[in-house]
Structures are given as structure tokens and as C-alpha cells.
Amino acid sequence: MIRRILYHFLTRLLTALLSFAVVWLTAHYLGAAGRGSVSLFVTDCAVVLLLTGLLGGSSLIYLSPRYSSWQLLVPAYGWALLVCTTGTAVIGLLRTVPPGYLLHVWLVTVCQALLSVNTALLLGRKRETAYNLLTVAQVLLLAGGLLVAFLSYWERTVAAYYYAAYAAYGLPLLLSLGALWQLPDRWRTGQPLRLVARELAYHSRSAHFSNILTFINYRLSYYFVAHYVDVRALGVLSVGVSLAEALWLIPRSTALIQYVDLIHAADKQAQLAPTLRTTRLTLLATGVGLVVLCALPGAVLARVFGPEFGATRAVLWWLLPGILAVALNIMCSTYFSGLECYRINNVAAGLGVAVTLPACAYLIPRYGISGAALAMSLSYATATVYLLRHFLRDTGTRLPDLLPGPADIAYGRALARKWLLLPSVAATPAERSDAS
């Protein structure tokens, strides 16, 4: 399992580096105002896509061992198209935006939604290599498209992001369809499509509700900042959030493999020991990343992103406690999802929202983007405390069992040294079996 986590982590690391390139390109060539406009577009798309998970999302991974991929594909695709169309129309009713903007939102969200369905099915069938390649391809095409547009002087406006997004999600969508076609699936008789859709909806509603609440905790502050401050300040905030959230690639990489293994395991209890070890290593790696991020001077940020982004350092300091809390949050919530204990995740996310709304309403008008960062950290910490309490109680573990110690540090060093040698050494079939 460790080898699979490391491969997945490297994929996430490469994706994070490419995402950083996207943040840098939009900030450097479009300025704070342009970066803020891009952030609003991305957030609008994410809001629409969030609802597509009510008939898909992680439930596609959960049900893929039980059903044919093609049976799951039909209801998931139909729901995705309906939600993208309806969601885009709602954005047009709630905000004053040009029709061309709505067309971009609809096209991008459709491509993203269908691609998300395909990659979830591939991951559920443990086609992790295809999943990782498609994940990297999306960000690589997005960064490459922006680079071509900006350096060639073809388009140095926010519209460049729209066009790059078409390539970033459209081409991987076609490739993912080819990967699905190669699966040894057949349409299974005796399982009516409406029953498959009903079970998918049943699991999705419970599993995805916490995702909706979590997204509110992550991004509601963007709309408050755009309303109470301005889009330029939102651009500065979004850069700080992007840098801080890049550290989440560590827990998200480990949690995804943990989730896949948990849903396939016959003995769920046996997965507790590797979960605890993985959690300790995850917290250790995230803590190291936090130290590095804290050491970045404001002058370096201003030099890298532009003079307008020197204030990003203050945002980072207010975000860092929440980022560490979320690393633990992700591991605990993934464990409960794998056991179908969705209610615990939902309540935790709901408590976060209960903190987010008043915190944003009070802090942002008074303290601007620093208040937004503080509101996010308060929300993350609240949800994590609730999840941690239930995790310790339900698993019979103690808090020290989750905290990295000298043995974990030594193990992490040995693992890092071993991993540095892996690219030059071909693993035998027996080694690959042991590593998984």
C-alpha cells in the first residue's frame, strides 16, 4: 500500500506544481484583479459541479465493484448534464454576468462533470495509473494553454483561462472514454437501470452531503470578500489559499488510497492499523510543509507573483492552523466514509458551516482578507475537533496514537531514501505484491 500511496503522492505533487504554475501565470500576467476574476469563475464552476455529486462522486467508486461501469455511467451522465444546465441558469439569475460568461461556465462544467464520472469509475476498478495520468493531464494542459496564450501575446485576458480550460478537460474526457472502453465490463442483465440509479442516489446523498457543506467552509469567504472588499483583494486571498491548500496533496493522496482499500476490504477492522500509521506520517509530512511555508518572506511572494501579492503572507499565517487541522480531518472523514458512517462527516461539516457563516459576516467587513483566512481556520478546526472525538471513541484509539513520534520520523526518512532509489530499480512481481 505504501508504494501505491507514494506513486499517488507523486502524481498529486506534480499536479500541485502545475497548479502553482496556473496560479503564478494568472497572477503575474493578469494582476490581482484578473486573478480574482479567475477565482470567481473557478468557484462558480465548483458550485455547479458540487451538485453533480448527488448522483455520483465517491459513490461511483464505492459501487463500481458491484455494478457494470456502463450501468453506473448512464444515470451519472444524465444527472451531470441536468445539473450543469440548471446550475448555470441559476448563476445567471443570482448574479449580473454577460451571457458569454454563462456559456463558458456551462461548457467547462459539462466537461469537468463527465470527466469526473469517468475517472471515479476507473479508480473504483483500481485503474490507478490511468486515473493518475488523467489527473496530471488536466492541469498540464491548463498550465500549457495559459503559457501559450500569455507568452505569444495571443490573449492576455481572463478569456485565456476559459479557452485553456476547454483543452484541459475536453481532451482528457476523450481519453478517459477510451480507458473505460478497455474495461472488461458487460451490461449485466437482471439489474434494471432504475434500481442501479436508485442505489447510486441513496449512497450519493449520504456521502456527498458533507462534501457540499465542506465546500461552503472552503469557499464561501470568496463571495463575502468580493462583496465587502473587491475582486483585487479576492485575487490576493486566492493566491494565499492556493499556496496553503497545496499542502493538502499529502492527506488527499493517502486518504484516497485508504478509501479504495477500505471499501474493497472484507475485514474493515484490519485496516485500522495501516490507517493510524498513514495518519501519523501524513501529519508529519504536512507539518514539515507548514514550516517551509511559514518561512517564506513577504518580499519573496511579491517578487514571485507581483507587488500586489506581498500581503499574501499575512493570509498564510491565519490559514496555517486550519490547514493542519484539515490534514487530520481528511484522514478521519475518509475512514468514516469507507465504513458508510456518513452522518458523522455530515455533522462535522455542518458544525463548520455554523462557524463559517457568522465568522465571515463579522470578520470580513472588519478585517478584510485576513478576517476571511481566520474564518476559514476557525471553521476547519471546529469540524476537525468533532471528527477526531468520534474517531478516537469509535476506534478505541488514543490521541497519542495519531501523533508522529521518533519511530515515525525514522520510518519516514528510511521510506524517503528508499523511494529515491525506486525509479532506477525495476520491481519484481513479488515486490509489487508486497508493496500493495
Image: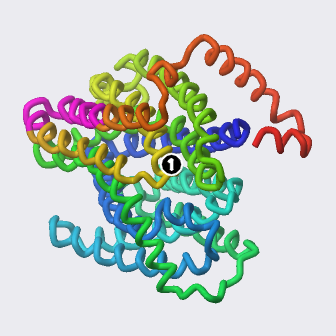
Q: Which residues are magenta?
A: 362-382
Q: Secondary structure at mark 1?
A: helix
Pick the quarter of the image with the C terminus: top right
**Count of numbered tags:** 1
User: In the rendered view, would you say 321 is above or below 198?
Assistant: above
Q: Nearer the viewer, residue 324 or 99?
A: 324
| Left or right of 285 on screen, residue 162 | left
Residue 117: x and y, percent?
A: 52, 68
- Report if residue 213 is visible in the image: yes
Image position of 59 with respect to 357: above or below: below
Q: Is residue 25 left or right of residue 271?
A: left
Please, what is the three-letter code of the amino acid marked with disc 1? Leu
* Quarter location, residue 408: top right
Q: Is residue 373 magenta?
A: yes
**How far across and down, in percent of the image, does residue 197 sit?**
47, 79
The quadrant where residue 358 appears: top left
Badge 1: residue crowd in 10 Å (few <14, some 14–19, many ≥20):
few
Answer whether residue 243 is visible to the viewer in this image: no
Magenta span contains residue 325 = no
Given residues 199 and 278, the one toward you in this image is 199
**What residue is rendered at 64% in x and 63% in y?**
122
Residue at 29% in and 77% down: 86
User: Could you say which is closer to the camera, residue 292 or residue 434?
Assistant: 434
Residue labelled with disc 1: 151
Q: Quadrant of the N terminus?
A: top right
